[in-house]
Image (cartoon, rainbow, N blue to C red):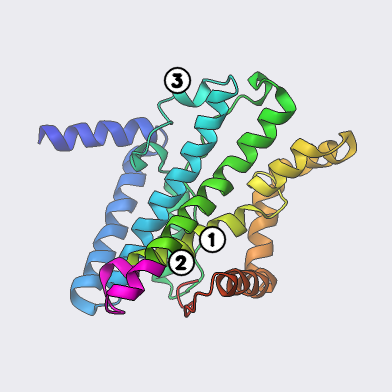
Amino acid sequence: MKKIKNYYEKFKILNPEYTKLKLCFLLLVIMSLLYMCVFSMGISCDIVSAIIIFILSVTFHEVAHGYVAYKFGDSTAKEAGRITLNPIKHLDFAGMMLPILILLSGSKFLIGWLKPVPVDFSALKPHRLGLFCVAIAGVVMNFILAIIALIVLKISVEFLTPNNMIITIATYTLVINLSLAIFNLIPVTPLDGGRILYSISGEKIKNFYNKIENYGIVIVFCFVYSGIFANVFSKILTFCLKLMNVNIELELI
């Protein structure tokens, strides 16, 4: 009981508003997932693996932002305890419930996020370079993880059977991290692509981004679910995989 209470207190700290309602909803979703896994077999081990890899990949992405910000003089993320690979510290209720709900609805295109690390951009020194490096850090981290996964995949296919767990994990790690990198390069704030453009642009473009930032996530959602994004995204991802000489059926994207 003491451990359960400690977990509840941690959850309460991370979700100070509507804590009990959020916890009940989270437990309901978990129970639904367990029911589908155990009784209806609606969710395969591959999908569970993909969700775990997604959470870990986004965790690395966020830690990269916080660590680079710290190196450029901003200790906000460090003081908040966010430069850690513990996913619990980065979980965002809405960002993690959305992909689960989409998954339960039967859709294969998933989108979600973790809680962005806090960054005081005014504290970065030198400011312009720091802004650029912090903005691009997450994407670079995802590309690094994708390259590592590619190396593991290339080596594994030479010695292991196609259905080996190592090959499966490497494949999902490669695809998920490439997907995260490509998605985050959309040039709309608060995504990294928008931050990158903001850091290298003149005052007119910066003023434009300042005006649309509050509506950025709405713009991204409209873009994603318009159907245009899925087609363009799939082509870009397929092109990247072909460059790497990797043949994968993109069924979970």
Secondary structure found at label 1: helix
The residue closer to the viewer here, 185 or 140, is: 140
The residue closer to the viewer here, 67 or 91, is: 67
Q: In this view, does 47 lie to the left or right of 115?
A: left
Location of residue 213 by image quarter: top right
Q: Residues within 10 Å of mark 3 (few under 14, many from 20)?
A: few
Q: Nearer the viewer, mark 2 or mark 1?
A: 1
Question: Magenta part mainly helix, strand or loop?
Answer: helix
Q: In x, y percent, where is residue 103?
A: 41, 68
Q: How many marks?
A: 3
The stretch of residues the image draws in magenta is: 154-168
Secondary structure found at label 2: helix
Residue assigned mark 2: 102
Q: In x, y percent, where is residue 20?
A: 31, 41
Q: Distance between the residues labelled 1 and 3?
A: 30 Å
Q: Which of marks 1 and 3 is in front?
A: 1
Q: Distance between the residues labelled 2 and 1?
A: 20 Å
* Sequence order check, earlier mark of 2 and 3: 3
Residue assigned mark 1: 178
- Checking the image for residue 212, the label placed there is none
Q: Is residue 221 above or below residue 64?
A: below
Location of residue 39 by image quarter: bottom left
Q: Which of marks 2 and 3 is in front?
A: 3
Location of residue 8 by image quarter: top left
Q: Which amino acid does label 3 sit on?
A: Glu
Q: Is residue 1 left or right of residue 56?
A: left
Residue assigned mark 3: 79
